[in-house]
Amino acid sequence: MSKLEIHQIPVLNDNYLYLFKDPDSGLVGIVDPAVAGPVLDKLDELGWKLTHIINTHHHMDHTGANLELKEKTGCTIVGAKKDAARIPGMDIGVEDGDIFEFGRQKAQVFEVPGHTVGHIAYWFEESDALFCGDTLFALGCGRLFEGTPAQMWNSLGKFRKLPDRTKVYCAHEYTEANARFAVSVDPENKALQSRFAQIRKLREKHLPTVPSTLGEEKATNPFMRADDPGLQAELELTGADPVEVFAETRRRKDNF
């Protein structure tokens, strides 16, 4: 079976959209379309026809183009069943544990509340692709606008169980700012120091730092490592409940 063909589309100030195709069936999807123009332009460039929108959560910088794209292409919109009232034009509702079939590709759906209460993510195992919206960022995680630290830590725990090779297709280019914070709370992490140097080189050339891999995030992202003794020691929370460590890390990032 062929893997998804994925194209990254930068929009707005720092958003990333992901246009993807199942080569075997010809189905084409877009993840979290904030605006329609760049999506339509890319479709024209590639000669593709949009068949699906998959949304991770309801924020307008992820759903703003749903209705326009649906009107112009007739595509099907997929989103969280429990958040149907906030996903414009949604046709198919999915929930935790569901398998979303996209041609010959299959995505496991995770409910990952924290950033919003209805946030979901899609893991295409055969393509090593995780579309995680604003739950997990390269070296960061989403602000807790609607959820709790316990919810977000549990959500990130679902990602920690996935293979290290999985690519993290997150929705924003926040990595350099996230790295500056990460080294402030985890200064002895050699892998983090090396990654930060690579990130600076990429951003100096205006190149994307996304996607990363889950292996990189497990080793260097402080929000994925609240149970790590070294990070706990830096936060003076040795032996504390990881939820407490995560909450303190998130509090510090919010005020960084």
Image (tube, rainbow, N blue to C red):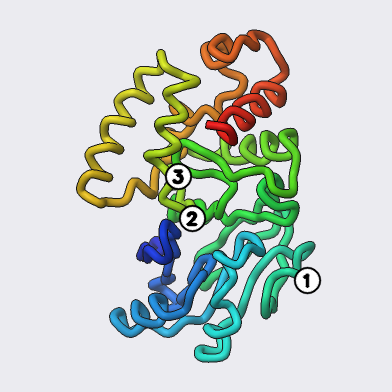
Up the image or down, 184 lies above or below 87; here it is above
Q: Is residue 153 left or right of residue 228?
A: right
Mark 1 → mark 3, Cα distance in angstroms: 31 Å
Q: Residue at x 51, y 65 (%)?
A: 105
Q: Measured from the top left, where is residue 3 in percent x and y?
A: 39, 61
Q: Residues within 10 Å of mark 2 (few under 14, many from 20)?
A: many
Three-letter code, disc 1: Ala
Comparing 92 with 32, the one in front is 32
Circle 1 sits in a helix, a strand or a loop, which is it? helix
For the image, the number of numbered tags is 3
In the rendered structure, which amino acid carries the disc numbered 3? Thr
User: Between residues 102 and 253, which one lies in front from this camera angle?
Assistant: 253
User: In the rendered image, which quarter is residue 38 located in?
Assistant: bottom left
Q: Position of residue 223 (x, y in %)?
A: 56, 31
Quadrant holding the N terminus: bottom left
Which disc, if any, is residue 85? 1
Q: Quote the CA–CA distance across marks 2 and 3.
A: 16 Å
Label 3 crowding class (10 Å Cα cut-off): few <14, some 14-19, many 20+? many
User: In front: mark 1 or mark 3?
Assistant: 1
Residue at the (67%, 67%) spot, across then down: 79
Helix, strand or loop under label 2: loop
**Residue holding disc 2:** 171
Q: Which mark is residue 166?
A: 3
